[in-house]
Amino acid sequence: MKQHIEHLIHMALTQLLESGELLAIPAFVQIDPVKDKQHGDFSSNIAMVLAKQLQKKPRDIAESIIQHLPASPYVKKVEAAGPGFINFFLTAEALGDVIKTIVTQKENYGRCKIGRNKRVLLEFLSSNPTGPLHVGHGRHAAFGAVICNLLDTVGFDVYREYYLNDAGRQVDILAVSIWLRYLSLLDEKIDFPANAYRGDYIIDIAKILHEQHGTFFYAGAAQIFQDLPPDEAQGGDKEIYIDAVITRAKQILGERYQLIFDMGVESITADMQNDLSEFSVIYDNWFSEKDFVSSEAVKQFLQRLEQGGHTYTRDHALWFRATDFGDEKDRVLIRSNGSHTYFLNDAAYHLNKFDRGFDLAIDIFGADHHGYLARMKAAMQACGINPERLINLLVQFVSLYRGGVPVSMSTRGGSFVTLRELRDEVGNDAARYFYVMRKCEQPMDFDLELAKAQSNENPVYYVQYAYARIASVFKQLAERNLSLDEAEGLAHIDLLTENHERVLLNTMARYPDMIVNAALNYEPHQLTNYLRDLAADFHAYYNSHQFIVDDQALRNARLVLVMAVRQTLLNGFNLLGIHAPDSM
């Protein structure tokens, strides 16, 4: 309906332009729903927007636009209001069409083809396989999953990818941590490095290693730690120390080291996949960094940069001329010791996304990646890729509160709350809903007590309770040996004249536009806000009116309205990945 009203205004503005009363038509006409239905159903501020251009009072401009509006079977009345708003009052037919559309389209209500099947690769979460997923990871997982659902709903061809960092230093630290815990099980006295992973999950993997391989990986503590630089507790640098331990482990274990490395990655990756699957987060592809860097792709990426003249050598290192493409400084690709930087491998991976034929690549990163986008866009531009095709969304950190007290999280230290523990405590539905009900760039305080509360203060409980209430209405109908006559209900939509009914009809009419806005702006919180509004409108209706009345025509009209509310709630729940309970 918003598009229809916008079309009417554009037609009026076109007439004013042709008559010379208007100099130019604005590119955007804002149409908003009106909260107080005494002032109509939709309103536009277009007259106030045009006031500066025309040097006239907005109210006079509004009156002129109204005079040039074409007739519409969906608009009963149009009024100028206040300083220059144009208020539109819809006909019963227009509002009735909302119900007919929902009843006809069912689960497809809100779907459209605005994405025109453009291929979008969305990479999200991509946590290092060095430990269980914690509550911070959960926000990335839920946010990415809902964005994928929204983009799919508006017509994009969405591909969900997890970039598995199964190579590099962090996984080396994991492997060494497992090995040292394994040696402790063999009664070796190990001074555990300050920078090693300390969670109980490390001990669990070490136990499996011991059960499967016995003493195959044994080495004495004296052999391992002899002549190493001091650790943090001895006044040394913990980073230098852990790197020295890794080097020593590889020297002692030889080919056996890779077995521990692979076991650690496989164990934790399997746990993450299971955790995410239980959280209804499914990927089309788990992209292995280890396999990728061993292919020719990184070499080919370097060749493209070199052939374009975008690299140079300085201090025995290979550099990328990132400043030529808007980055704040040039970036190292290959260090003086011959090792690849993470940026090199990651830039090659991003180029690979476009080489696979994707029109857009969307990355969902943590807030600490703020400075990363410029260099990645620079690398894509150097390879002939329009940098606007690469979109980076930053997700802020999560602070977890229990009883008003913050819960600390540290993957290295092992004292963190896992995503699985959170889900066990508050449930999948509350976790997914809470994770996406704020803008991603806003830090999030996750209130455990609120998420578990069975009250209207708990937003997910509030919206699910609306659905359960609707289910109870139809149970009551069956208990009275009555049934919904859908055809009769649709034929008597004109009987829905109560203010609560018009409010519900207007709110449901907003759903398709809201979905488009939420998808194209990557803002799933628009959906949670909408569901809260729709639930509030229904609760108000439920508390004020009887649905199962003696008047059969009115009863069926109200029930078909309630059925449309149920379908709209269900469609929104499916996008969020939460359940639609029949009772609570």
Image (cartoon, rainbow, N blue to C red):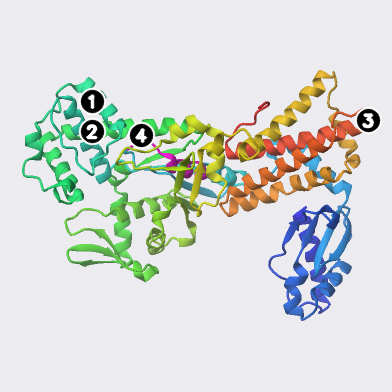
Residue 362: numbered disc: none
Q: Residue at 75% of width from left, 66% of height from top?
A: 45
Contact? badges 1 and 2 (CB < 8 Å): yes
Where does the magenta region start and end? 131-144
Categorize mark 2 by other alpha carbons within 10 Å: few (<14), some (14-19), many (20+). Answer: many
Q: Residue at 79% of width from left, 75% of height from top?
A: 17
In this orientation, which residue lies closer to the viewer: 409 or 329?
A: 409
Type of amino acid at the residue the image marks with label 3: Asp
Q: On the rendered structure, is 533 left or right of 158?
A: right
- Secondary structure under the numbered disc 4 in the rendered image: helix
Relative to 305, is 556 above or below?
A: above
- Secondary structure under the numbered disc 2 in the rendered image: helix
Sequence order check, earlier mark of 3 and 4: 4
Residue 209: numbered disc: 1
Q: Residue at 29% of width from left, 58% of height from top?
A: 302
In this orientation, which residue lies closer to the viewer: 207 or 157?
A: 207
- For the residues labelled 1 and 4, the Cα–Cα distance comes to 16 Å
Q: Which residue is mark 3?
A: 551
Sequence order check, earlier mark of 3 and 1: 1
Residue 116 appears in the rendering = no
- For the residues labelled 2 and 3, the Cα–Cα distance comes to 72 Å
Q: On the rendered structure, is 82 left or right of 329?
A: right
Q: Which residue is mark 4?
A: 269
Q: Which residue is mark 2?
A: 178
Type of amino acid at the residue the image marks with label 2: Ile
- Of labels 3 and 1, the one closer to you: 3
- Of labels 2 and 4, the one closer to you: 2
The location of residue 519, given as percent across then percent down, is: 59, 50
